[in-house]
Every structure is written in structure tokens, then in C-alpha cells.
Image: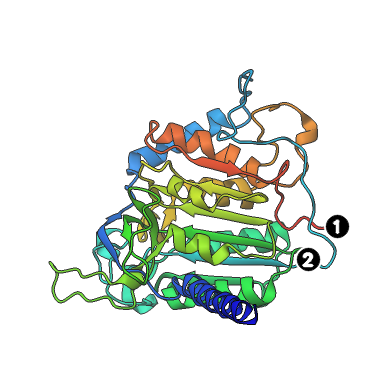
Amino acid sequence: MKKTLLVAFALAFLLGVMGVAAQEKLDGKFDKPSKAKNVRISKKQVLSESDRKKLDSIESELKGKPAKVSAVVDPSVGGVTGVLGDAIPTGGQKYAILVGLANYPGTVNDLCVTAAKTEEDSPTAEDGLAYYCKDEDALNMKKALIREYGYEDDGEHIFIFSDADAKYDAIKSKIDELVQTKLTADDELVFFFSGHSSTGIYMDDLGNDNGDEALDEGIVIYDQAYDETDAATYVVGDEAFIWDDQIKAWFENSPTDRIFFAFDTCRAGGMNELQSDGRVLAMSSTEDQSSYTYYLGGTQTDVDVFQESEGLFAHYFVRRAMIDGLGDGSNPLSKKDPEKYDENVAMEEAFSYAYPIVKTATGNRQNPVLNDKFLNDLLLGYDLTD
């Protein structure tokens, strides 16, 4: 009997050790960039100057125009209830990780006019037009969070990774720091990305494809192993890509459910894997569509006036809806209800404002997608002291 118990104990111990080792391997399998095959970079399409000029009239026509209410409301076209969801509990903190790229390594992927493209990591005013080859979307999101939603600009709550600073190790390290050491169940977190996307089949540390989908989607960041030996050669390293399953795994054990994700990139709808109760995902396009730019870096709009890079969706979702306040009251269910205008812009209102403009401007070639699992409307920064 004692021998049997000893064998059983030994077996249980062995299985336990194997389980811990397996879990450790599972937990660490995304600690480094994943190798992938059949990788393709999906570059944003360029909105023409004439199409951009048409947007003013489109925006004017759509702004405040009552929408026909259908019997069944499509949540992807706004999802606005007109009722604020839960506030951040007393003592809860507000954090954001904002990533934006226009100036990629080399020149072939730069989201800039031809004359502004540069191989410089961080161009200065001395570099002329190349100075404007930089992302503006993440900076606009930072401005919105501070000015409109009460986020603290103290270096401890908003973390921005623009262009050459948007590297794999830096982004993952900050996510790990927040998720594993700082976040509590009472906190709020924003993750924002603007740039190119990728498709491919990523491999885990053992070289296996998990086979959960035919093609994995990813975001393209600043490559730490970039090499361009001549103008016709472009070698992209594994560090250039963060795949959807990686992002999902990094946020899997987040102490807070109150997370807002936004992606302005091609095939953005493929980030739906991040959906979970309490989260809102605003994505610039469907899984099968490209997304458009609003401005390329270096675009001249007036005498000696040049623009940094902006995505079409981010321009209307962040700059126009949030910063300019035009999303306030944008509700496809009740456009004329004055109670919906409360001088606040919930994420669903911002989406509801941007959606018809982006869709109309591109002739249905870019249809933003909202995945909303937050009860009622998510007003970022809304806490019990308001």
C-alpha cells in the first residue's frame, strides 16, 4: 500500500513539474519576436488631394443630419446608447500606450510625400521637408486624453512610442510593466496604434503554427534588425511585427477589464481577437480592407504650411470627434435629442461621428468597425469625482 502511494505521489509530482514547465513555456512564448512565413505588409492607401477637399462638404452634410432608425440597430455603426456606463472607481488610475508610425526605417514604407521620405531615424528642422515625415495620430490621441479626458501628463500615465521609438522591446516592456505590476481592477487603459499592418502565419518558439486562422494579422513597428543594402533591397526582421495573438496574450491577464483599443491600419478588423467583456475596440477598416491616409507627412496645405502624417479614420475619430468635440451627441438612435449633447464625447459617439464620413469618403472601400463589450457608453477618464 505504501509503495502504491509512493508511486502515485511521485507521478503526481512529476506531472506537476511538467505542468509548471509547460505553463512557463506558454507564458514566455511571446517574450521575443515570432518568426513568420508568407508575410506581407499592407500599406495604407493614399487619399487624393481632390478627395480630401470633398470631405469638407461630406462632413457638413452628415453632421447633425438625422439618421433613419431601423428596427434592428447595427452595433458596428455607432453602438451608442446615450447612457454613460460605469465610471472609474475612486482611486482608479488612467493609463495609455500610444504607438504611431509614419517614418519607418529606410524610405519604402514611409507614410510621407516622396520629397519628405528619409532614412533618418529622427529628422530635425535642419533636414527640411523630412522634418514633417512623422506620425501625428498618436500625438493627437495624447492631446485628446489630456485635454478632454483628464489623463495626467506626468510621464507616469501616458507612454508614447512614435516612429523610431516604436520598437518591439520598448512596447512589450511597457505593456508588461502596466499589466503585471501597475494596473489594478479599478484602472482604465488605452492602447492606440496607427501605421501599417501585416498578414502572415506566425510561429511560436517551437516553430509551430497554432492554426487558429488561415492568416494572422499584425501591426508593423520600427524594425530593430532593419537592413537596406541598396534602394532595391528591403529586408524586414522579425522585430518589425507584433501579431494579434501576441497582443492578446500580453493583455490576457490584465487586472482591469476597462480597456479601450484603437487601430488605424489596414485590415484593422482582424484585431477582433482582442475582444473581451468590458473592452471597446475601434478599428479603422474591416479585416479585408485597406485604410487610407488623410495627410501624408510633408503635405503642403498653404504657403510654408506643412502637415505631419494622419490616418483618415484617426483624423475624424480623434481630431474632429474628440479634440474638436464634434462627436458630442453623435447618436444614430436619436440625433435630435438635446440631452445627448453633454459636452463629453464617449468612444461610441466618436466612432458614430467618424464612421459615415470615412465610409462615404472612400466609397465603401474603408468601413470602420466597432466591437463594443462595455455596458452602455464608454467615456474615457470618467471617474466618481466628476
Three-letter code for the amino acid on which mark 1 is drawn? Leu
Residue 227, placed above or below residue 284: below
Q: Residue 229: percent from the left, percent from the top?
A: 15, 77
Residue 148 percent across, percent down from the top left: 70, 56
The residue that appears at 49% across and 72% down in the rendered structure is 22
Where is the C terminus found, in terms of image quarters?
bottom right
The quadrant holding residue 205 is bottom left
Horizontal side of 135 relative to 35 (left or right) equals right
Q: Are marks 2 and 1 in contact (CB under 8 Å)?
A: no
Between residues 311 and 284, which one lies in front from this camera angle?
Answer: 284
Count neighbours of disc 2 (C-alpha within 10 A) and say few if under 14, some if 14 to 19, many if 20 or more. Answer: some
Q: Nearer the viewer, residue 24 or 92?
A: 24
| Mark 1: secondary structure | loop
3D distance between C-alphas at marks 2 and 1:
10 Å
Q: Which residue is mark 2?
A: 92
Question: What residue sits right under mark 1 in the picture?
Answer: 384
Q: Residue 14: x percent and y percent?
A: 53, 78
